[in-house]
Image (cartoon, rainbow, N blue to C red):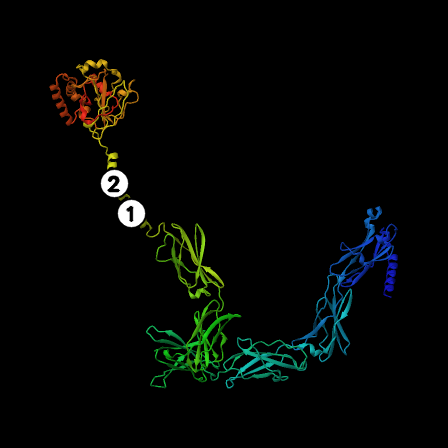
Amino acid sequence: MVMETVRVLQLLLLTCCTSAPPAAAESGNYLVTAPHPSVLEIGTNFTATCMIINTAEVTADDLYWNLSQATVPKEQYTKINTTALNVTIRVSGEKDEWLFCFCKKVSPNVFLNPGKFMHGVSLQKGYRPRKPENLSCIALQEETFISPKITCSWVAAGRQTKVVVTNFTLILKVINDVVTVNVTTEGTSASVVLPIFPNFMELEIWVEAKNKLGSIRSERLRRESGYFVKTNPPANIQIISEKSFPTSLLINWKPPIMNQYVGLTYEIRFCQNGSHDWAYVPHVDTARDIQSFRLQNIRPDTVYVTQVRCKNYREGFGYWSDWSRNATERTPEDLPKGKPDLWKIDSESDVGGRGVQFICKDPVLSNGRILRFDMKVQGQKDKVKNGSWESFPVNRSDLSSSTFLKDVLLDDKRSLKVFVTAVNSVGRSAQASLFIPEKAHELAPVRELRGGVHGGQMWLQWKPPNTKAVTEYVVQWVGGDGMDWQRENRSTTHTVIKGDLEKFVCYTVSVYPIYSGWAGQAASVEAFLEQSAPDEGPTVRLSNRKPGRNEAELVWTEIPQSKRRGFITNYTIFYESRGGLHSVTVPSNTTSFTLKSLTGNTNYDTWISASTIAGSTQGPHHSFNTLKYAPGEIELIVVGASLGFLIVVVMTMVICISKKETIKKNFWPQIPNPGESTIGYWSPDYPLKAETPKENCLSGISVLDVDMSDGKMFDEDKSSLPLKKDKYLSEEHSSGIGGSSCMSSPRQSVSDSDEGGDLADTTASTVQYSSVVASNGYKGQTPSSQPQAAIFSRSESTQPLLDCEENPDTLVQEGGGRHQRFLRRPAESDPAHFNQLLEMEQQEVLEPLDFCPLEEDSELTRADEQSADWLPTAPASSYVPQLGGYRQQ
């Protein structure tokens, strides 16, 4: 049945579309869509049909649908015939869309004319209106009448779109008067105006919501007109305080409208001035049409604020008017009710004993201004039991809630009883007492007192003393510039401090048990209501000791209690140099710290940060320089260097003593004695052969054995010398010795000749003694069987030159004499003369040698200056004087 109905509807739609699209046919389109609704309801299904007209080129199989450029799935298609195709979609979303029917490109005509093979439906969406709810109307008072203007408001259920807007029409009908008024709006409130307010008549009010998708009405509100009335608040509120009734106030007012229009009932509320805790008078006590009321059982000498409002007296009718303006009045004073709150503050006295300061608060129900406190102090062991009363006037110029009474210096062995009463303008309060025991008999404190903060309040918890005699507890807190206390009953083990506490202030909270008026010992804790970072950081400095090379001691003072703003959890020491930033964390109870492992001769910048649980604050910076050397290090270096030098000196002296001979030999060499020199033989024609000298012989002296057996004079053999004159003469004048003490350059010796070769010794430091001797024997010595050539003899020594050598001019004659003596010898055949001469020569050996230069023209002198190196030495016992030196016998 349902399928048949759908089919019929589709055929009707197709018939309408076939007869309707002449415009499409005239435009040359080959596709047409239907229907084209003005608006669609969101959340419903919509079915559209696409039909092929004026062409047989395509069929329904070539058609497809697009919704917002997305192809609709084929499952949502319904093929009616070869020229019509349906699609069913769900209307969702509030944004307008297009539903297009397209043709697949199956021929050149379709490809070339795509615009003729497409057609679409515009989908505008909206919500069906919902029934308005919570309809309410009100008529306000104008002057002394009710206004004919009635204002209503409601709640529009459902949603709206920009395209489909819902309009509301407010309709008001006066029953039995056939008067109907209405107003249309897009909002949720409206007002209708009647010619006159219909007092005591019945009204019917409703709202109709309507848009393109339909309309709907709200529930009808049918009430008497007084149901919608709201009057003005009562006027001229007056409060009267009567001195004879200190606990009551009389309130008078005037009604805002006459009873002919609206009968009124009233509501009264009141509270103490500054409080928002209102107290309401029961409705049963405020009868109809009253214009005054007496407040009773309120506190004397207290300022009260009172307000009054009214409405239609019929139950459930009308609206309460606004509250009247505040009316304020103070109740009269009365006798104080209750006792003064007496307490004490303990302190240590400078002169010994206990200092007790007594303070007092007004009674909770003072019922007037307290003018003075009367106080009596009595010792337990005083002979006079009834002490005198002292009066202490109350000065309320300050904001403190307590009054200082008296300071008492109490001996440790003395107990005290104190009694106080409060007095106002009416009379005296009951008596309060406080007893102070001897110090040795102080009563037990509470146990395990703890404090903390929770929910913005400071709480305390404790365990009672191990006794049941406690009658109450006093909780005292001291912080900043003030102190206060409160009392708790004997069963309390935890409480919240009820005073006005400041943030970031450290409070010392104490709990005192009270034993029938006797004050027990206090248990105390420190607490903050709220913590923050300190206001300032610690000021750091070096201690009195100077910084060392690798360490420095820092000291700082604790932050003042008023600037800590929390419990100090730790200090962090920062110190910075070219090597980087370092930090050390120390406990909160530390006020000094020694930095170690520092670098010598370095500038350090240091500061300290103080931390709480809420943050940290840095203190000012301080700079210092470490020493280049540690204390005592310079003294240690000096002492070490001195000891080292002393050890070196001692070792040097020991070495010098142990190596005395070696040092003497190296630094002060022994100068050879020419008298102990050895004589070597040397000839230019023969090579030299060294002969090791003996220990008792002077080194560097050698003698050539000359053959003088022929008895001829030495002068006669000059021609036989193979040396040439020019080769044996020095370029400068010589003393006959190898070198002079005043000359630094060596002299040319015989070894420089063609025959001498490399054997010559030319060092300037060696003193040479040289001579030329004949080849014949001397003084009776048997000459060699073979002829010998002339031989040079020389002696080398480090002995400085003699004066006669440095001054040859003055010794020419003496040198000549010696020359003659050495050249002239006796004949070998005269032994007696020979022995005599030998003894003379041996005696001269024992005397210091006096070598004087020969004459400059002497051939022998020139030969002696050019003498060669020493020849092998001979024993000292065989030395005999010879010209220019010695010869071996």
Is 601 left, or right, of 95 in this rendering? left
Element at label 2 = helix
Q: Position of residue 190 (x, y in %)?
A: 71, 70
Is 233 left, or right, of 404 in this rendering? right
Q: Position of residue 421 (x, y in %)?
A: 42, 83
**Residue 166 appears in the figure:** yes
Nearer to me, 600 or 790: 790
Residue occupied by mark 1: 643
What amino acid is at disc 1? Leu
**Mark-to-mark CA distance, 1 and 2:** 22 Å
- Residue shown at 47% from the left, 83% from the top: 338
- Residue shown at 59% from the left, 83% from the top: 292
Q: Nearer the N terminus, badge 1 or badge 2?
A: 1
Nearer to me, 149 or 213: 213
* Quadrant in the picture for the C terminus: top left
Q: Position of residue 291 (x, y in %)?
A: 60, 83
Q: Which mark is residue 658?
A: 2
- Residue shown at 63% from the left, 84% from the top: 289
Q: Vertical placement of 511 versus 825: above or below? A: below
